[in-house]
Image (tube, rainbow, N blue to C red):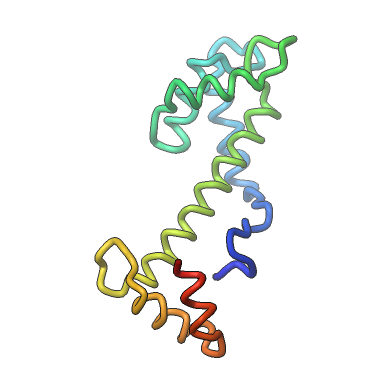
Amino acid sequence: MFFSQAGARPRMWEASPSEHKKWVEVFKTCDEENKGYLSREDFKVAVVMLFGYKPSKIEADAVMSSVDLNTSGILLKEFLDIVRKKKEAQLYWNEIRHIFTAFDRHYRGYLTLEDFKKAFKQVAPKLSERIILEVFR
C-alpha cells in the first residue's frame, strides 16, 4: 500500500483485456468517419466517455501537440498510450487520496503532526520520531 520511497510512483499499470477492448471500442465510436485517427473534438468526446470529464483546452493542446505531423490526429496506438497514462495517473492519485484519508483520522481534510505520528506508529513502529517529524515538515 505504501511506496518504498517518498514520491515513488507505482509500477507501470497494464489494462485488463476487457478494459483494453473498451478503449478500442471508444476509439472506433469516436472515429465516426473511420478516418483511422481522432481529431481534437473526437478526442474530447473519448475522454468524456472514458473518464467522465471534458478535457481543458490546455490538456487538449498538450495531447494534440504531441501528435505526429504526418497524421491529422491521434492514431489508435497513441490513443491507447494516452489513456493508459491517464488511468495510471488516476490510480496513483486515488492511492495517495486513500493514504491521506487513512492518516486523517478525524476527517478534517488536513493532517496534524499527531495524526502523522499515530499513522507511522502503526505502519512503521521502529521509525524514529525525528524522521517522522522531518517527513511531516
Quarter of the N terminus within the rendering: bottom right
Residue at image point 57% right, 10% down: 33
Which sits in the foreground, 7 or 102? 7
Residue extending farthest right: 70
Estimate the x, y position of residue 42 in percent, counting from the top left.
51, 18
Against 105, residue 48 (above or below) is above
* Residue 104 x/y as whole percent: 33, 70
| Image location (x, y in percent) of residue 109 | 28, 61
Q: Residue drawn at (49%, 60%), measured in percent from left and top?
A: 95
> Residue at the spot x=42%, y=25% of the render?
56
Front position in the image: 96 or 113: 113
Residue shown at the point (50%, 48%) measured from the top left: 90
Image quarter where the C terminus lies is bottom left
Left or right for 47, reference 4: left
Left or right placement of residue 106 versus residue 44 in this view: left
How many numbered circles are shown? 0
Image quadrant in which you'd find residue 105: bottom left
Q: Residue furthest bottom?
A: 126
Q: What is the x, y in percent for residue 119? A: 42, 79
> Which of these two is toward me, 97 or 124?
124
